[in-house]
Structure formats: C-alpha cells, structure tokens
Image (cartoon, coloured by chain):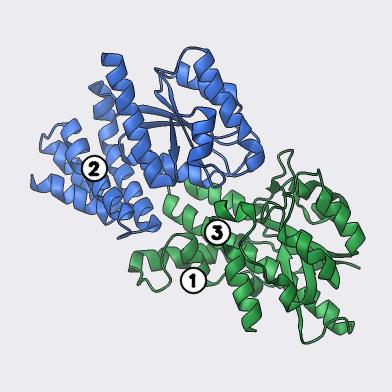
Amino acid sequence: MTELLTFSIDEVVPDRVAVLQNQGIPAKRRLSPAIETLYARAIQLLTEVAAPVGVLSEISISEFEVVYRGEGQNEPTTPVGDILGRAENLAVFAVTLGERVSRRINECFQSDDPALAAMLDCAASAAADKLAESAQGRFESVLTRAGRATPGTAVLRYSPGYCGWHISGQKTLFEFLRPQQIGICLTKSFLMQPLKSVSGVLIAGPKEIHSFQMSYPFCIKCETRGCRERIRALLAD
Amino acid sequence: MGILADISGNVLSGDDRNVAELTHKAIEQGLLPKRILDAGLIAGMDVVGKRFKAHDIFLPEVLMAAKAMYAGMNELRPLLQKEGIPSAGKVVLGTIQGDLHDIGKNLVGIMLKGAGLEVIDLGNDVPPERFVETAKDRHASVIGMSALLTTTMPAMADVVDCVKSQGLGHKIKTIVGGAPVSDEFAHRIGADAYGFDAASAVERVKNLVGRNEDETVA
C-alpha cells in the first residue's frame, strides 16, 4: 500500500510551546507584546506559504532491513535494530511543508528582518514535526481500519540521522519510497530539499517495544533527548 | 552622555525607528561617529549579549535589537567610511560544502555585526578553498564555518588544513559550530575555536580577533 497524503492547514499550524521552545523560550515565560506580534506574524506567514504533502508506503520487515542497513554505516546496536524483531507492521514515510517556506525564510533574512526569519524558521520546524505526527496518525488509522491494530498497538516514527541510524540511510529509504513524487529530493550529502521535510519509518507494535533506555553509546552525545518525551507520552496513553 | 544612553536603551528594546532618529540626532549634535558607534550602538548590543547569556532575554529580543542596531549603523556608515574607521575585525562566514542549512550561520553573522565586526557571508554549500581565498583577498582574520550534517563536517578539516598548509595560521583563525559539531571535533581537526551556540561563537570570535591583533603587534 502506498498512499499520497494531503493535509489541511490546521494540521500544519504548530503547537505554540513547541515554536517558543525552538527559540529557547521557556514554556511559561510571559512574552512581550513585540514577541507576541512576531509570533502571530510568523504563524500567519506559515499558513500562507506552507503546501503540506506526504507519502506513506507499507514495507515488510525484510524489505525494511535492507533499507535500514543502507550504506552499512549504522551504529552496531540501535533502538530500531532492537525493536524491529518485535514490530508487527511497518511503513516508510516522507512529509514536507514545501519549498516556499524555505524561500520565505530566506526572504525575511534578506530584507533585514532576522527576528521574523528566525521565528518563521522555528515555526516551520515545529510544523514539519507536527506533519510527521499526522503521518503517524494516518498509518494508525490504516491499521485500525484493516483490523491490524489492537488497543495496545502503538506507532512511533524513527528517522535517519538519529539514534544510531546513519543519515546515509536516507539513500535507500528514498530508493524505496521515491518521495521525489511529492517534490522532496536528496542531495549528495543526504540532505532533504525542501529543508522542512521529515522522513523515516513508522513502526507499529505493542507500545512496550518502543520503550528503551538511553544506554546506547551514542546517547551520551545526544542533545535533543526527544526520545524521552515521546516514550513518556506513549506509555502514559 | 544622555543621548548615547538613549541609543543603547533603544537598541536593547529593539526600537529601530528610535535608534535611527537618535543616531541622526547625535550626529547633528556633533558627536564623533566612532563614539556614537562604540558608546551607543555597540554598548547597547553588549548589554543584549550579557542578558541573553544570563537567559534574561531570548533569541527574538536579540534579533530585534540587532535590527535596531543596523538602523543606527545605516546612519553612521557613510561617516565611518569617510573617516576610514575600520571595523572591529573581519570574519568570513559560511555553511560548509554539501550543507544548505544557514539559520545558525545567519544568526551568528547578525550577532557578529552587532558586535561591530564586518561579516563576509559566503552563504551555504561553500567549498573549502573559497573560505580561504576569500579570507586572504578580503584580509579577514577569522573563518567561521557551520555544519548541520555529520556528512559535511570533514570539509571543515579541509579548510583548517588549507589555512595551515599555506602558512596562514598566525593570520587567519578558524572557528567551527553547528549541531553535530563538538569541542572535541574542533580540537581534533585543529580549529582554533568551537562555538557551542551563537552567543558563545561571538565571544570566541572576539577573542580570536584580539589574538590576531596581538600576534600582528608582536
């Protein structure tokens, strides 16, 4: 099953806390009127220029193992490598906000409005994440409709470049998924264009399989520690 | 002087219109352009930098302050150029070859200009030799490189090697930064400094420029 995904603008508008956190602003911080105005302008701009689209394709475990192995540069042990044996269903996906968002950010910098450029960039990053969450939700719906999900089933996404999955893994992922069909290209250095794009694998299985400790060697260097929040949210559900 | 304190205060509050008007007024009052720059505009950005480092203000305020500072600089620039007043130093900045991320690099550039430095921004996907050739041609004393992809980081080592192999290490210092970059990596490739974030990058660059001046005098 391969499905092209369309999204409404509501699915793109990011969570305010996420945008402000991307700017280094604590969640409970009271904002000045000037920053509130800046935030509102950035969100308005984002809704004007974003063209969200995605693609999702189911993949068997053996097919994904080939994709995941990629150029052979992954860390020896990784969360995805450890989880795969217990996964029930997999899909690879890619989503993007489109090229106009990146262009608009650059235009703001060029027109000497760095504050708006940075706020828009942070809003777009949070929106791209939200889009990936939506793709996750779509796969859950597919499985539920097909009777392949139980109340204990959870779907979580994992992306190349994180948690020991080498970024060169984008190459084999792109060969399988062909996100060029929705306008996402891969550079020689494995960078996706448009920049505000997210790709990866959606792993569905009992929620416990997604719970791992930060005890992999590469965890020491990790600065985001995004896995902790995702796992906490998953187990709390 | 009152008007210089007013300029600093309006830089801090990000009021670009007031900064431009007050700078113009200070010029009309006969204050020296260099004094307006140092004691008005840069002094304001110094306070911004300190408060940012103390987590008292955040990125949006810093960038609004930078915009206000530029508004004042636009008033002063013709006079500074006429008097031949040099900048606090020249920095060549760019995102390394193979990488197109430039937000972090842009933010560093903005804050460096706010500190009175001249920034030659080469953009993104910059080949190693272009960093070095530009620094030589434009007499820059620092090369700043940004990378957000692990696959592009090796090219930073190429820049450092190029500087050293041409015997320019005493004249041109290198600083690296970006999410996957670390102090350990900077040390391993022989870079002169590592910028953990935009604020620390600016501090390191100011130190590097100072070191270059000391070495030149020596």
- Which numbered circle lies on residue A17? 1
Using a 10 Å C-alpha cutoff, classify the residue at mark 2 as few (fewer than 14 neighbours), some (14 to 19) or many (20 or more): many
Write down the colour of chain A.
green
* Circles 1 and 2 on the same subunit: no
Q: Name which residue type carries label 2.
A: Leu
Mark 3 belongs to which subunit? A
Residue A47 at what x, y percent from top left?
59, 66
In this rendering, position of residue A232 left or right of residue A177 = left
Q: Earlier in the sequence, mark 1 or mark 3?
A: 1
In this rendering, position of residue B72 left or right of residue A146 = left
| SS assignment at label 2 | helix
* Circles 1 and 3 on the same subunit: yes
**Which residue occupies 20% across, 53% down?**
B9
Instruction: Using the numbered discs, state the Cα–Cα distance from disc 1 to disc 3 in whole angstroms.
Output: 16 Å
| SS assignment at label 3 | loop
Q: Name which residue type carries label 3.
A: Thr
